[in-house]
Amino acid sequence: MKRITKISCIAAALLAGSAVAIAQPGSYTGPSTKPAPASAGYTGPSSVPLMSARDLLDKGKDDQYVKLKGKLVSHKGGDEYEFADQSGKITVEISSKLFPEGTTIDHNTVVELIGEFDKETFGESTLDVEQIKVAAK
């Protein structure tokens, strides 16, 4: 009986330790000395339309995938940022793990955002960003 109890305690400790390791989120913490991972995936033409912030707010449809090009002009807190282009501003939600590692993005950096538009009838409509990259100059 003692052996079963001892094995159960060891198993519980191992499971608890692995749960803590899994639960800790990864996040971008600034420049890094490790090399950036090789970019993989499709890089050709896309049917995701490039829109302006104003057109998206005025004409965008709920759950529509779009691309915006402009600047993140301020951090509103949490995952929310204010994005601006020549036409206007929109709130975007960006998980910290989406920011490219080893790249500094500030209010002067031109970025391309691809994401899903969350159109609200009442309240603020936002873009849920799924991809962010520094735009070619």
Image (cartoon, grey):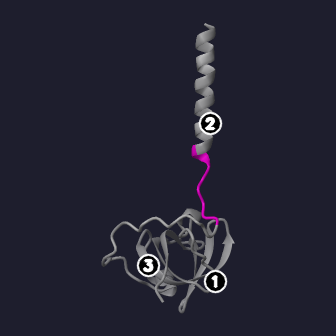
From the viewer's perspective, is the residue at label 3 or at label 2 nearer? 2
Tell whether position 131 is magenta: no
Within 10 Å of the Cα at label 2, are there few (<14), some (14-19), or many (20+) other Cα atoms?
few
| 3 or 2: tag closer to the N-terminus | 2
User: Which element carries disc 1, helix, strand or loop?
Assistant: loop
Read off the residue under disc 2: 17
> What amino acid is found at the position of numbered circle 3 in the picture?
Lys
> What amino acid is found at the position of numbered circle 2 in the picture?
Gly
Left or right: 88 as drawn, with respect to 78: left
The residues tagged by marks 1 and 3 sit, at their Cα atoms, a distance apart of: 18 Å
Which residue is painted at 41% across and 83% down in the image?
50
Label count reads 3
Q: Give the x, y percent position of residue 121.
A: 53, 72
Q: Residue furthest right?
A: 77
> What amino acid is found at the position of numbered circle 1 in the picture?
His
Read off the residue under disc 1: 107
Name which quarter of the figure residue 74 lies in: bottom right
Left or right: 76 as drawn, with respect to 91: right
Q: Which residues are magenta?
A: 22-29
Which residue is painted at 42% across and 76% down in the image?
66
The residues tagged by marks 1 and 2 sit, at their Cα atoms, a distance apart of: 40 Å
From the viewer's perspective, is the residue at label 1 or at label 2 nearer? 2
Which residue is painted at 57% across and 71% down in the image?
102
